[in-house]
Amino acid sequence: MMNDSVKSIFANSTADAWREVGQPRPHESAVLHVLGEATYTDDIPEVQGTLHAALGLSQKAHANIKSMDLEAVKHARGVVAVYTAQDIPGVNDCGPILHDDPILADGKVDYVGQPIFVVVADSHDNARRAARLAHVDYEELPAILTPQEAKKANAFVLPPMQLARGDVKRALQQSLHRIKGELHVGGQEHFYLEGQIAYAIPKEGNGMLVLCSTQHPSEMQHVIAHALGLHSHHVAVECRRMGGGFGGKESQSALWAAAAAVSAARLKRPVKLRADRDDDMMVTGKRHCFHYEYEAGYDNDGRITAIRIEMVSRAGFSADLSGPVATRAVCHVDNAYYLSDVDIAAMCGRTNTQSNTAFRGFGGPQGAIAIEYVIDEIARTLGHDPLDVRKRNFYGRNDKEGRNVTQYGQKVEGNVIHDLVAELETSSDYRKRRADVRAFNAASPVLKKGLAITPVKFGIAFNVTHLNQAGALVHVYVDGSVLVNHGGTEMGQGVNTKVAQVVAHELGINLPHVRVTATDTSKVANTSATAASTGADLNGKAAQDAAIKIRERLAAFAAKEFGGEASTAVFSNDLVHINGKSVAFAELVQKAYLARVQLWSDGFYATPGLHWDAKTMTGNPFSYFAYGAAVSEVVIDTLTGEWKLLRADVLYDAGASLNPAIDIGQVEGAFIQGMGWLTTEELWWNKDGKLMTHAPSTYKIPGVSDCPEAFHVKLFENRNAVDSIHRSKAVGEPPLLLAFSVFFAIRDAVASVADYKINPPLNAPATCEEILKAVEAAQADAA
């Protein structure tokens, strides 16, 4: 349906049949991807004289550097220069919020893998080999490695935060039933296919061009300028596309960009810094692991009457984005459920490990899984179907029903979770399959099946209000072709395709006539990161704003040229209709150019209605909520802990989807990535603080064989109640939470070992070992 709150290109029903938005168009780089012709940062032809850099990494988790002998490094084959913190001309910092994250460690190291020097050589291999020849003398210090240890030591990167509503103490005391327990949910490596990389090219007048795989070009620009002691206008950062980001290239691409730029500035030669997979995983942060302690009160129907949750995350050695991650976790503890009396505490534990950072979901999954675990416990304790307990705790649909205000004070509007879950329950044949699973388990002593359905309610917007803005440029050339530049970055998610569709739609031209260029800080300034699922929302609106301005100028010119009113002009299917006449869009553009009509425009958008009080942790932080639900069926082997996902049914609320093909692909990918986080992807540090799962040989992401043979993904028919871009909804992060259904299906299968009478102690990731431990615990409790 048409967006009724912006000026539409359609003035009558004749043009309504023609649309570019809402169509399942191919990804704009699909052909290039298939042919291997899509240009990533490492594919860009190198400028003559290009050198290659590598990082020298700490071998200790926490230590003072007593001395550092780099002579062997300097005299290694092909080495041109070696730089330490003292060689950085400006500020030695790449922290996105607090200035607590050095580009190169200076005098002290805080984790195994922390960069302490840069070596620049004539080749990538020579630089890497040389980096391993350093002799560093350390004075080791005590190291903290887990969030539990950090809490015990009162070691935090930020002050603890707390959100409370109602009287939890009294509500717990008055509750008919109470449960309490602990849960640990591990972190996750981003494992983007393209690793961290930056290519710095010096320009005249102290200028610096950095080609970088990053989700946040403007942040890279600022960090590089500060490191070089220059102003932002000296630095240009460009990113055509990334081979995946998932949050790992939001803030943590800064270290690589700054190190390359400092080296290039000192040598006056281009320098490329490309991380090998092992180095990338050793240096960069992950999704935050969380440890939970919870206590909840509930009634005979399983309705939650009070809940207290304490969350401690492994932040790593510096703050990075741990504060906003913890804030979003606090704001998503409710997931799809109304919580009347709550007490939520979140702590960011300082540990001597990689500084953890943004990851798809940005704390939302870690917050929401806690309440799902609690509801799963309640349902099994009462002997009720978990779906029924979930339904009883859902937010109300409207003011009349009540129960529709979140713990942070935002009203839940446009709530479709009741209808969405009801549709999925029917389409997935949930009730019959529940009975079938029970019958299978009763007859199968070794293999056990599990089934679970879990909902999602996810808030869309940046936690920090001022980040919810975007800019765009739209150029119409004399031949009628259109070039678009916007502040979003393309990491495979299709934001460029969606923005191009929006512009084509507004100008009434077919999609092939629109081209989107690389994100470039010299074109659109002061951009926000492409994160928080806002890429299409913000940049689509900004590009739409620019396209509307151009269309209105062309309409005014057409009225002057052909008669009639500008407001009656209809742009559709490469034609402009006015006053009974039709003219080709390209022909009208040529005429407008000769008449000196401006054929380019800037556009801007700032999300309205957002506010947040960080001190009270209350406000209206989200523009709207996206919803979804998934049903997963698994089978486990109780002798080995092995498991397999047999079937998944997913229903996701993308609003009035801009591109259903891309959105369904995003839902599928997010679901599998979330499944990996909760099942196979285990991060493990040894007692000395070294990450041992730092390569594909030891860290296991899901493969194609892990996808279920029956994978049913559908978009829920809906239209955003909020004035988003063409009433669509974000699809980047929320679907990842749908994978909760896999974890709880595994727990359901484990519980069948004890005839569903006990709650098995299953932590995430639910690896084969973890499943086997839970099975043995269930068997012991049942004996």
Image (spheres, rainbow, N blue to C red):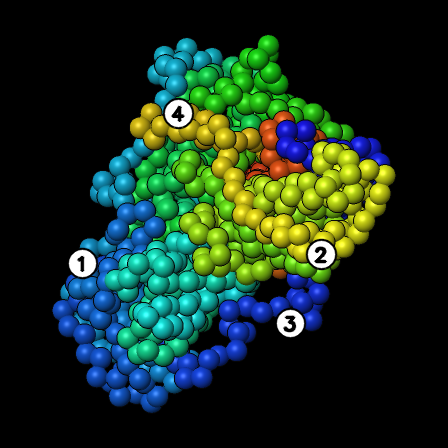
Q: Earlier in the sequence, mark 3 or mark 1?
A: 3
Q: Position of residue 368 (x, y in %)?
A: 50, 34
Please tell me whether mark 2 or mark 3 is closer to you in this view.
2
Q: Position of residue 488 (x, y in %)?
A: 53, 51
Q: Earlier in the sequence, mark 2 or mark 1?
A: 1
Q: Position of residue 526 (x, y in %)?
A: 42, 49
Q: Amino acid at mark 1?
A: Leu
Q: Earlier in the sequence, mark 3 or mark 4?
A: 3
Residue at 22 percent across and 79 percent down: it is 70
Instruction: Say left or right for 642 vs 513.
Output: left
Q: Position of residue 252 (x, y in %)?
A: 39, 57
Please determine whether, in this image, residue 191 is positioned above or below residue 363. below
User: What residue sits right under mark 1 in the picture?
Assistant: 141
User: What residue sits right under mark 2 in the picture?
Assistant: 590
Instruction: Say left or right for 418 vs 281.
Output: right
Q: Amino acid at mark 3?
A: Glu
Q: Secondary structure at mark 2?
A: helix
User: What residue sits right under mark 3 in the picture?
Assistant: 37
Q: Earlier in the sequence, mark 2 or mark 3?
A: 3
User: What residue sits right under mark 4 in the picture?
Assistant: 618
